[in-house]
Amino acid sequence: MQKVLGGKDFDVFIGSSMVHVIEAQVKITDGRKPKTVRGVPKGYIDGPVSAEVTLKLDHENWLILQSQAEKAGSWKGIEPFDVAFNAEVSAGKKNIEAFGCLPQLEDLLDLKAEGGDEDVTSIKCPVTSPDFIKINGVPYLTADEVRDL
């Protein structure tokens, strides 16, 4: 029986720093939509695309990003970075790369006075690079879409 890919199999890198995430998501919004003639689909129209990475980090791994903010002089001063999610097991591999991720603190603090829960910070990172997203080395966007950018 083969081992299937699960969340524990992923190594996550923010730039060149490996971090351990509690949760992570990469979401793509693809604005293509059907063209209709008299209410009947007839082809499609390209639309805008966007992507966003969301990372939930424990305090220890949040400090890795904190050090980047200190070097930059502020949280908003952190330059966009690439985020990579790499995993490979006998059943196959999944490598997702998101380029030019602009960090924005989202859930900075959510505590309960009685304790019992770990401190978790959520960071959303809109993708800002025309390199956009690659999935197992294959770009999401076509070469035609990113020409001359």
Image: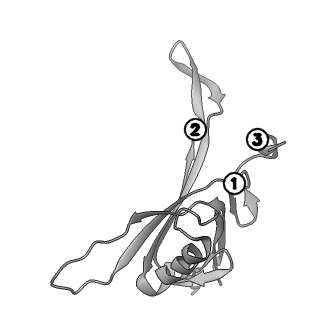
Residue occupying the point 57% across, 87% down:
1
State the quadrant of the C terminus.
top right
Q: Which mark is residue 129?
A: 1
Judged left or right of residue 3, residue 109 is left
Residue occupying the point 56% across, 85% down:
3
Judged left or right of residue 24, residue 111 is left
Mark 3 to mark 2: distance in Å? 13 Å
Mark 3 to mark 1: distance in Å? 13 Å
Residue occupying the point 20% across, 86% down:
115
Q: For mark 2, what is the residue?
A: 31
Circle 3 residues within 10 Å: few <14, some 14–19, many ≥20: few
Query: Which residue type carries mark 3?
Result: Glu
Q: Of residues 33 and 60, which is closer to you in this image?
A: 60
State whether residue 79 is above or below residue 18: above
Judged left or right of residue 59, residue 5 is right
The answer to which of marks 1 and 2 sits earlier in the sequence is: 2
Looking at the rendered structure, the secondary structure element under dot 2 is: loop
Circle 2 residues within 10 Å: few <14, some 14–19, many ≥20: few
